[in-house]
Image (tube, rainbow, N blue to C red):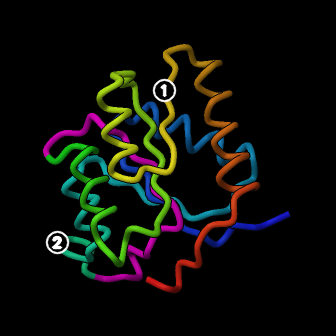
Amino acid sequence: MVSNSTQPLLAVEDSDEDFEAFGRMLQKASIPNPIYRCTDGDEALDFLYHTGQYVDSVTAPRPGIILLDLNLPGTDGRQVLEQIKQDKNLKSIPVVVFTTSSNPKDIEVCYQYGVNGYILKPIDIKQLMRTIQVLIDYWFEAVVLPDVARG
């Protein structure tokens, strides 16, 4: 089995409840990856570009994968995704959109920008946990992620 256990995960999520549910599922699955959280798009871009409060790359390492909500305060997830996928130094980082938006236009735009996956957040807590488990199984156990050292 491939191990992505050293790959940092960046979750860009403004909902405390959704972030906590995701964190619980990672713990339950014994996923040892370091998790970093940004609560809006501007903070996520600061994290990725080592600006603002994230100047130190030790406290803001290059993520192996980004879990991105679309509906964020300030710079929204669509704008963050577009910027990541247009940047030659960041575009190889897999980005998975995890959102409540089932708008076909959002789905189309995200894939046009180069998103690696688009997952709808279920409202039902049991279905949410199952969806998070599938995400963990795929992205942390089945997929080979690019080496973050290239950053």
Relative to 44, say whether 60 is above or below: below
Q: Would residue 8 appear left or right of 29 to someone viewing this image?
A: left
Residue corresponding to mark 2: 52
Dot 2: element = helix
Amino acid on which disc 2 is placed: Gly
State the residue at coordinates (75%, 55%): 141
Quadrant occupied by the C terminus: bottom left
Q: Is residue 59 or residue 93 the one in the foreground? A: 93
Disc 1 designates what residue? 121
Amino acid type of the residue tagged 1 in the rendering: Lys
Mark 1 vs mark 2, foreground winner is 1
Find out whether the residues at labels 1 and 2 contact each other: C-beta distance under 8 Å.
no
Q: Which residues are magenta?
A: 56-74
Taking the magenta stretch, the answer to whether it contains residue 6 is: no
Q: Residue furthest left?
A: 74
- Residue ID at (44%, 31%): 17
